[in-house]
Image (cartoon, rainbow, N blue to C red):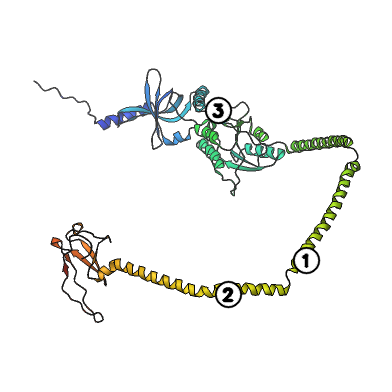
Amino acid sequence: MTDAPASNAHEYTVSELSGALKKTVEDTYGHVRVRGELGRVTVARSGHVYLDMKDERAVIDAVMWKGLASSLNFRPEEGLEVVAEGRLSTFPGRSKYQLIIERLEPAGEGALMALLEARKKALAAEGLFAPERKRDIPFLPRVIGVVTSPTGAVIRDILHRLSERFPVHVLLWPVRVQGEGAAAEIAAGIEGLNALPEGGGIPQPDLIIVARGGGSIEDLWAFNEEIVVRAAAASRIPLISAVGHETDTTLIDYASDLRAPTPTGAAERAVPVRRDLAERIAKDALRLSGALQRSLDRKASELKSAGRALGRPDALLQGASQRLDYAADRLERARTAGIDRARVRLDQAAAGLRPAALKRDIAERGRRLAAPAGRLGPAFQRSLADRDKSLASLGARLNSVSHERVLARGFALVTDAEGRLVRSATALEDGQAVSLRFADGERAARIGEGGEAVLPDPPKPDKKTPARSSKPRRRTPPEQGSLF
């Protein structure tokens, strides 16, 4: 084989070639505008968004940095047609080119409407727009919470209309109503008003109004975001949505309990007109007074008719009055007769209570009691002596069968370490601790080999206690019983 002729072409390293390609692509396509449908959309932990733009024949990788992604007024979703502006570049780490997006917008209002319709269907399928979820608006709320921008004309229109109709306490929760973070602030406002405790320093509102002035669909898009719709549907406090003009419709309108065409219309639906209410109350009071007077007149007429059928009152009472006179006369006679009978019984009882007769009766009863009283003392002494003898006999019998007497004769009572009585030598094991109870006290012992009980050495005598024998006592327990 012969050597191939040397080439004089420049040799690139991989990095040099990748860098040259990157510079060529970026110089040639430094600014492009691409229209296509979003495919895969991935949000990284860093906040950057990686997505695919495609049509029926090709796919381009694209990346949107965190700053631009957080400032979008809509959420990029798969299937949405968009127009992206940016620059084409390469990613040397993967040897692939990608579109770095610097601006992203839906491809016309029709794309946003399609996205809005798809989101509406998904939320409706969850039951967030169901009529049975909606609550009645209170007739006369004491406190109204308003979620809107603190600097726009909306809050001024609401306060002005409320002051004209029926002034109430208004709590303003300031939020941004469009742009980056607006949806999160609106949802937080609804949840925050619901979280106010009853009876706290800040009163909990009886009604919430979420309001914004008119604008394009992009301007109102925050009220189409899922987080806002779910917060409105979950609100425990009745909620009125007043977003845009009468022709504008956002998803919060379907989740709210009542939709008002304008913020001013929301204030009108929130409270009645105080003057009209006062006139209505006055008319109702007049009608009630007239009805009450007519009822009283009718009852008086019925009473007069009933009175004519009853006759004259004095004629009705004459018979009862006469019967009362007869009864009073009989009562007086009965009272006098009863007093006379009681007086006779009293005189008879007094005759038997003469002092002399009482003394004789007391003396006679004393004589009859003297004889039994004289016999009672000796009989009690004899009974007491008999009981003493019986008690002594029983005590002697008890002592004769007591184990204390047996211990006094030189036997001992054996118990184990848990205080249970040992009745057999076979119940003890070598080395087991036992307690020996004698008539004059207890000693601890341990069973030696062969079943012998070994008493421990007695304590050394001190100056105050006489010394005892230091020889250990060994006694072999009998085969049966607990005494030895």
Question: Residue 357 occupies which quadrant of the picture?
Answer: bottom right
Question: Residue 454 occupies which quadrant of the picture?
Answer: bottom left
Q: Quadrant of the C terminus?
A: bottom left
Q: Amino acid at mark 1?
A: Asp
Q: Which residue is mark 3?
A: 130
Q: Mark 2 and mark 3: span between their CA atoms?
A: 106 Å
The foreground one among 325 and 255 is: 325
Q: Which residue is mark 1?
A: 347
Q: Mark 1 and mark 2: span between their CA atoms?
A: 34 Å
Horizontal side of residue 472 vs 188, given as left or right: left
The foreground one among 430 and 190 is: 430
| Secondary-structure class at tag 1 | helix
Q: Amino acid at mark 3?
A: Ala
Callout in the foreground (1, 3): 1
Residue at image x 73%, y 70%?
A: 353
Which circle's residue, 1 or 2, is located before the other in the chain? Answer: 1
Q: Mark 1 and mark 3: span between their CA atoms?
A: 99 Å
Which circle's residue, 2 or 3, is located before the other in the chain? Answer: 3
Q: Position of residue 243 (x, y in %)?
A: 59, 32
Q: Quadrant of the N terminus?
A: top left
Label 2 crowd bin: few (<14), some (14–19), many (20+), radius 10 Å? few
| Secondary-structure class at tag 3 | loop
Callout in the foreground (1, 2): 2
Q: Position of residue 103 (x, y in %)?
A: 46, 30
Residue 438 visible in this rendered orientation of the protein: no
| Secondary-structure class at tag 2 | helix
Q: Which residue is mark 2?
A: 370
Q: Give me the disc on residue 375.
A: none
Q: Amino acid at mark 2?
A: Ala
Q: Position of residue 440 (x, y in %)?
A: 26, 72
Residues marked 1 and 2 touching at CB (< 8 Å): no
